[in-house]
Image: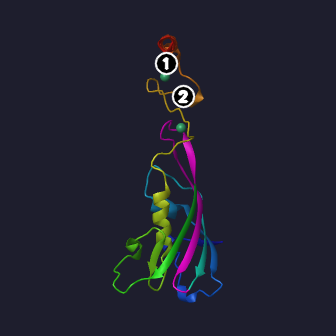
Amino acid sequence: MEKLRTFGEIRIIPETIGEAGLERDVSICPEVVQGVLDNTDLSVTDPFHVHFVIEKFIERIHVSVDVIGSVHTLCSRCLAPMTQDVNLHLNSDYLSAASDMQGNLEAQRQARETGYYRKEIQLGEYIVSELVLSLPIIYLCSQDCKGLCSNCGTSLNEGPCACSQQWDPRFQKLAALKNNIRR
Ligand SMILES: [Zn+2]
Ligand SMILES: [Zn+2]
């Protein structure tokens, strides 16, 4: 598999693509992925794998992309180290840019699935912006992570802490009270 040092190297020159289209697999170095994510809470230790298929139609070029990798971080609730898998499926049409379109064509997208190109399709730029958007704001080691006790800091995923045992009798009384009210 071809190893790339930058996402920018993922470029397609439509003129060079024949009727059969194009299919490619590339891998992106962990440091490069880490660089584009630009988030000190995330670390990337393994290469990202990018697979893309290009189909040429009369007035448009269709690109489908799979991005597979993983990032390491800490759970937002319990602070345990965790790995978040990245498994991104992208689809975009590319149309020939109008002559009055200026500057960065990625910024000209009117719809998420329609991009523009001049001589080259800057596929890497599209992948980077979708990759950054796809990452969660809050990372959870599991959907039902119980987090840390706000009193003693123990991870409640490992069972109740001493504080909750102290509180138990009160909760039991409260539960009994609620039951009485219901009756
Ligand atoms: Zn957690
Ligand atoms: Zn506690």
Q: Position of residue 153 (x, y in %)?
A: 47, 28
Above or below for 84 versus 98? above
| Disc 2 secondary structure class | helix
Above or below for 170 versus 17? above
Q: Position of residue 79 (x, y in %)?
A: 50, 38
Which residue carries the number 1 mark?
163
Q: Quadrant of residue 21?
A: bottom right
**Could you tell which of marks 2 and 1 lies nearer the N-terminus?**
2
Above or below for 82 versus 34? above
Q: Which residue appears at 51% of the width and 41% of the height?
A: 75
Report the magenta residues as a range. Answer: 58-85
Whole-Å distance between the Cαs marked 2 and 1? 11 Å
User: Amino acid type of disc 1?
Assistant: Cys
Q: Position of residue 137 (x, y in %)?
A: 45, 49
Mark drawn on residue 66: none
Residue 171 visible in the picture: no
Q: Which residue appears at 58% of the width and 69% of the height?
A: 65
Q: Is residue 127 magenta?
A: no
User: Amino acid type of disc 2?
Assistant: Leu
Which residue carries the number 2 mark?
156
Above or below for 156 versus 50? above
Q: Position of residue 8 (x, y in %)?
A: 48, 73
Q: Is residue 68 magenta?
A: yes
Answer yes or no: disc 2 within 8 Å of ligand 2: yes
The N terminus: image quadrant = bottom right
Answer yes or no: disc 1 within 8 Å of ligand 2: yes
Q: Which residue appears at 48% of the width and 37% of the height?
A: 77
> Which secondary structure dominates the residues rendered in magenta?
strand
Q: Which residue appears at 55% of the width and 86% of the height?
A: 58
Disc 2 vs disc 1: Cβ atoms closer than 8 Å? no
How many marks overall? 2
